[in-house]
Image (tube, rainbow, N blue to C red):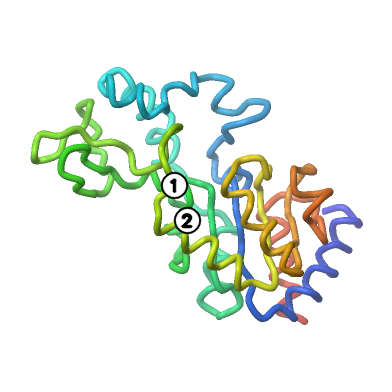
Amino acid sequence: MSPEASRAVLRAAQKLGQAKRLIAFTGAGISVESGIPSFRGEGGIWTRYDPATLELGRFLRDPAAAWPTIREIFYEYTSKAEPNDAHRILARWEAEGRLAFLVTQNIDGLHEAAGSRALAEFHGSCRHLVCLDCGTRVEAEPALLADLPPRCRCGGIFKPGFVFFGEGIPRNAYEASFAAAETADACLVIGSTGEVYPAAEIPRIVKRRGGLVVEIDPEPTGFTESVTDIFIRAGASEAMRELDRELVNG
């Protein structure tokens, strides 16, 4: 970690230690260290696959054609991924009462796997499947994905439990996320570009209400100049380990 990042960690720890209600907001950058590639940018998933695969209308018209690519992107990658230190520290902070709520843009389910429960998966999760006919929601077990498209007991076709392009945000996740932002006095942003709306409004709401925004990312983002109060330029796990150590020692 650079000297500048270390100084930013110290400032962040001092401020976050005084927060009465801290929330976290995470994006794809927190899961890169778990082996899950980001969607955007150099080497991102959308440089290798057609994003139209995840258009809701296209999927509904021909789910059999879409499912092989969906399985390759979301289930062959994510089935091998494990939570990293950043996921685990956030889960422990929740258990210790340090973190009030976590909003994630990610659909990989790694926060849940790490133990986070006060959690809103803003864009849903690939760890679940939803029947298009009867609405049954099940775990995305490998056996269900062996034959494509996967089918429910009722005969209906399963859709992944994450939000497709052209699909609305799950109401419960949306309402819980914005309610958390409206009551927070600090927000820790990790690995988000700040470009995907309406999710990217969450840290901005905290900022407009006079709250503190601490950001962790290896590179500046859409939050850095206009929203972030303290920018820790580092990877998610390294920064979280240092921040955790300073908070415990402080």
Answer with left or right where residue 244 lies relative to residue 103.
right
In the rendered structure, find residue 169 and report the number of the disc placed on it: 1
Residue 217 rendering spot, x and y as whole percentages: 73, 48
In the rendered structure, find residue 174 and report the number of the disc placed on it: 2
- Crowding at dot 1, Cα within 10 Å, few <14 / some 14-19 / many 20+, comes out as some
| Marks 2 and 1 in Cβ contact (< 8 Å) | yes
Amino acid on which the number 2 mark rests in the picture: Tyr
* Mark 1 residue element: loop
Answer with left or right where residue 244 lies relative to residue 58.
right
Q: Is residue 9 above or below residue 77?
A: below
The residue closer to the viewer here, 139 or 192, is: 192
The residue closer to the viewer here, 124 or 93, is: 124
Q: Is residue 108 above or below residue 164?
A: below
User: Which of marks 1 and 2 precedes in the sequence?
Assistant: 1
Q: What whole-number distance in Å separates the C-alpha atoms at marks 2 and 1? A: 6 Å
Amino acid on which the number 1 mark rests in the picture: Ile
In the rendered structure, find residue 239 and report the number of the disc placed on it: none
Q: Is residue 13 above or below residue 71?
A: below
Residue sitting at x 20%, y 27%: 147
Residue sitting at x 65%, y 46%: 192
Quadrant of image for the C terminus = bottom right
